[in-house]
Every structure is written in C-alpha cells, then in structure tokens.
Amino acid sequence: MTDLTTPLHAWHIEHGANMAAFGGYDMPLWYSSAKNEHLAVLQTAGIFDTSHMAVVRVEGPGAFDLLQATFTNDLAGCIGPSRKPLVPGRAVYGAFLNKHGHVVDDSIIFMMSASCYLAVVNAGMGPAVTQHLQAQASGRETAVTDLSGSFGKIDVQGPQAANIMAAVLADPVAAFEKLPYFAFKGCFSERMPAAGEIRLRDGHPVLLSRTGYTGEFGFEVFTPAEALVSIWESILAAGEAAGALPCGLAARDSLRGGAVLPLSHQDIGDWPFSNHPWPFALPYNEGGHGFRKTFVGDQALLAAGDAPHTLPFVGRDLRKVTLPARVLDDTGREVGDVLTCVTDMGIGRAGDRIYSVASPDAPEGFTAKGLSCGFVRVDRALAVGTALELKDQRRRIPVWIVDDIRPDRTARRPLTGFWQE
C-alpha cells in the first residue's frame, strides 16, 4: 500500500519525480537521472526527502536502562576507541533484536538528555519498534512514544553540504563548532530537551546531525513537519549555485550499497544478526568472544554458531542481477542468495584497484563507468578475493568478495575540511 505521503509529496509530483512505493509511502525514486543524482552526492551535493523515516521517543528515569537492555550497541561505552559513554549531543548505530537474535529494525539512537532519547528507525517501523520497547519496559519508569509523521527530515549529503547549510542557518559558526561524525545539535520540537539551540534564518528550530546514509560528508536535518516545504525549498535554493540536486531513493540505495551500509529487512532481517560487515553495532569483548553487556537476543546470537555469513561484493562492470538471485561458487554449486545488488556509478577499475570519482590518487584519465556491488548471504565464511557468480533469470555475472567498496568516502572527515567561516 502507498497511502502514506510526506509533506513534500505535491512538490515531488510538480517537479516530475518518478514515484514508487517504499515502506508504505509514495516516494520519489529519481527526478531526471538516478545516475546524475548519485554523482552529485560525490561531487557537489544531493538533497533527499527522508521524512518517511520514523522516530520513537524514549523518556523517563528508566530510559537508559531500557535502551541498554534492548539495543545491540553499548550506550555505556560506544564513543571512540576508548569506548566513552553516550552523552547528550551524540548518536550511535545499532539494532533492536527479538529473543531469537533476529532484527526487529536497525536504528540510530540520539541522546537528547540523560532521560530522553530518540530512536530513528525505518519507514513504517515506528509502531513495531514502539511495541517492542513497551513490551520490554515492565518495571522501568519509561514512556515510549511513536513520533512518526510529526516531523520532517531532509538529508543534505556531499562536499558542498556545509556551504549549503551555512546559507540557511541563523548561526552556522555556532552550529558547526565541535560537530564531529555522529554528533548533533538542536531539536525539531520545543517540547523536548535539545542539545543546544539550532535555528534556521527563518526562525524554525531544527536538529542538525552529522549523519547520513550515503557514506559521504553531510547532514540529516530534522524539522517541524509544518515547515518542511519552506525549509526544503530554501535548502534547494541555497544549493543551486553549487550544482546540488534533489535526489530520490534510487540514488540513496546505490550510494549506501557502495558505502557498505545495510538496508533493514533486506540485508539484515529475520536471521541472526551476526557474521556480517557491521560488528561495530554489537558490544563484543576484546578479541570478539562474548559480549560486554546483556541485551535482548544476545544469548541466541552466542548460540547461533556458524550462522549464514553476509559479505560485500563488487562486480567487473556495471551489470547487475535482479532479485531474487542466487550465488554460485567456482564449482557451480549454489551457496547462498543475493541480498542487495546495485550499481555504484561513482566507481570504476584501473588495473587491479577500484577508484572513486573523488579519489585524489586516481590515475590520469580515469573515468568511473560504474560497478555492480552489494551483499550476498552465503553458507560459510569466504576470504576477500573469493570469486563467485550471481545468477538471476536473465544472466550470470562474475563478482568478488571484498572488505570495502567505494574508496575515499568522506562521511567521517572533519567538518572544517568542507567549510571555513
């Protein structure tokens, strides 16, 4: 069903977006070219309507304990190599699991205060995650509220993102000061605690976060729902001179694939949340044996043993397979299935290396022609460099297991490298 829309739905239609169903919402897939939108994020900036995402507020004296007992990451030790605890103004990625260790949904947790947290989850998952947390809240003084539909969200991603946001922020110097990766400031509602005050030039409050789903430098901007259209138009106007483009979900999908980021209920889902490229989402002890805290599903993960392995791959060219598709080893035996297969149009091969259009050391004359990439789920661990074949109803394509896909990603780089006062 696609009976849900964001406040920008009419804008998308008026501007010729190709629309499709996603998470129960009617959302733009692309405007004029998914390829150009993908490349804009790597070279200038892309601006996405992500208001279909859901937010669950967890507040009260027992909020920390509830999240610590249900979230895979360790809120008491998740910041940096020294494992500092989560503090107001910082966020962390992880997942909510059921008792079988299977994914209810993945999430980024934003700590607003010692007793108030926001769990950003996927489209349509607000009710399910709210119910899951409420079922675990017994005995804890905690209120869990689904805020879905009460806010707007815009992602501004790419090397020009800071310049674009500086043009619409009332005080960009204050907003950008000490804002590392996975830090945030402000709030989209004056009815909850804020990690500092961030306002736009038009006076609207926003939550400005150094996060995103592209692997590139940028921001997620949470806004009041009633102000979303005007804020969207002001951000687009600020980005026009820099070559920024409005982008749809197709570019978001190909960018996240190249950045080795999972799509919930596709790359992670109804199987054990283990043996995957995202071990940082789990509170492993030193050496990777056991967990340093308890959480819902932990014992099932420890007992899962050699569960299926989720691994990233890269193809030889831009050809991809259509799901459902199977994975064959070098003997022709089926060993698993394809979870994601997209084409990252910003990368290509030169010799035995993969380069990005943003790679500073790309050889002279390098042109990114695009490479297929994504994730496979197979029955055993495979070494980097292992050759496989992906097979759908129309074709077979050769691919190789890798430990990373698009090189020279910028998401973690300091903000000062992209904007100077």
Image: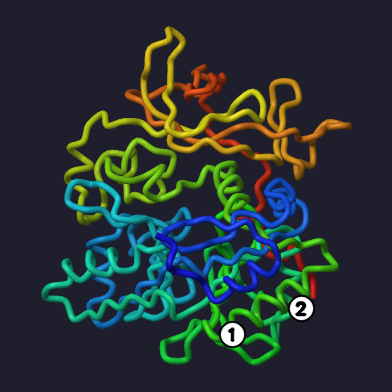
Earlier in the chain: of badge 1 and badge 2, it is 2
Crowd tier of the residue under label 2, counting other residues whose Cα lies within 10 Å: few below 14, some 14–19, many 20 or above: some
Residue 156: which numbered mark, if any?
none
Judge whether 327 appears above or below 26 on screen.
above
Q: Measured from the top left, where is residue 308 in percent x and y?
A: 31, 31
Residue kind at label 1, given as amino acid type: Ala
Q: Residue at x 21, y 36 (%)?
A: 304
Residue 227: which numbered mark, if any?
1
Q: Is residue 156 left or right of residue 394?
A: right
Q: Residue at x 83, y 64 (%)?
A: 242
Q: Is residue 131 left or right of residue 208?
A: left
Residue kind at label 2, given as amino acid type: Ala
Q: Residue at x 79, y 76 (%)?
A: 421
Q: Which residue is mark 2?
A: 167
Q: Is residue 366 left or right of residue 391?
A: right
Q: Quadrant of the N terminus?
A: bottom left
